[in-house]
Structures are given as C-alpha cells and as structure tokens.
Image (cartoon, rainbow, N blue to C red):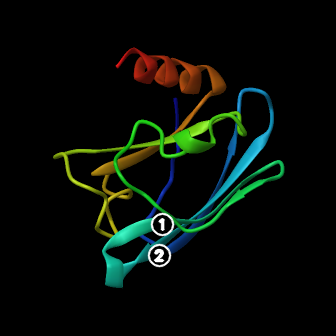
Amino acid sequence: MLKIENLTSDPLQKQTVVLPDGSRVSIRLYYRPNQYGWFFDEISWNTFLLRGLRVTNSPNLLHQWKNGIGFGIACFTKGNREPTQANDFSSDAASLYVLTADEVLEYDAVLQEE
C-alpha cells in the first residue's frame, strides 16, 4: 500500500500518485462541512473517471470497479469512526492508501473465501 502523504485540512486538494507500473492516478479531495465528510471530487486514471464518492472506512473503496482499473484506494481511521472532520487526514486520525493491482487481487480473494 502506498500512503497518500501531505494531505492537509484544506477543503479542496489534489494529489497525484505514481503506481508501480508507472501510470499516474490523480485524486482530488473535497471536504463538505455541511455533510461532515470528505469526498473524492475526482479520481482519474487513464480513461477511468470517478466523481463524487464519499470517503469512508474501507479496505478498498473502489472494489466495484476492480475489473476496470489497476489499483484500489483504502481508508483507515483511528478510533473506528468515519473521517468526518476537516483535519482528520492532516492530524493522522485518518489515512488514505493506494492499493496496487496485486493488493486488490489479494483483497478480492479474501472476500471470495467468505
């Protein structure tokens, strides 16, 4: 897992993550105070484009698109609560990670066992 570093409490921010295969994932995060939550304003990779997904605790927020993209995104928080505060990522109360294609397959295999 590749931790997305340097997230701040700014309500709109953009990060670019380089995957092991050399491709780039562009992630734009937006905090909506009236909904007490972070949202992926946009995730783009090659021809894949996703807008408006709420950030929640999940081992792979992009699981439903696993067959069309070569990565995943995980969110984990301390204290077992959702990332609802503007400073959750800047204070390390919550962390976002980009999963490699192999990690997406491993997670899928775990789900198949259930």
Amino acid type shown at disc 1: Phe
Q: Residues within 10 Å of mark 1 (few under 14, many from 20)?
A: many
Residue sticking out furthest to the left: 79
Pointers 1 and 2 in contact (C-beta within 8 Å): no
Q: Which mark is residue 107?
A: none
Q: In this view, does 48 lie above or below 19?
A: below
Name the amino acid, label 2: Pro
Any mark on residue 39, and which? 1
For discs 1 and 2, the disc positioned in front in the rendered view: 1
Binning the other alpha carbons within 10 Å of mark 2 as few (below 14), some (14 to 19) or many (20 upward) gives: some
- Residue 51: give x, y in percent of width and height: 62, 66
Which numbered disc flags the more N-terminal residue, 1 or 2? Answer: 2
Q: Which of the 4 image quarters holds residue 88? A: bottom left
Residue drawn where x is 47% and y is 24% of the image: 107
Say above or below: 105 vs 54.
above
Identity of the residue drawn at 56% across and 43% down:
64
- Relative to the observer, which residue lies in front, 87 or 54? 54
| Drawn side of residue 107 relative to residue 114, left or right | right
Q: How far apart are marks 1 and 2 (CA)?
A: 10 Å
Measuring from the top left, give residue 5's x and y in whole percent. 51, 47
Q: Which residue lies furthest to the bottom in this view?
A: 34
Assign a secondary structure to mark 1: strand
Q: How many labels does the image show?
A: 2
Q: Residue at x 80, y 32 (%)?
A: 22
Q: In this view, does 73 lie to the left or right of 21?
A: left
| Residue holding disc 2 | 11
Above or below, comparing residue 87 to residue 82 in the picture: below
Classify the position of the C terminus by image quarter: top left
- The residue that appears at 71% across and 47% down in the rendered structure is 25
Q: State the image coordinates of residue 32 (x, y, percent, origin top left).
A: 41, 78
Secondary structure of residue under mark 2: loop
Nearer to us in this view, 17 or 67: 67
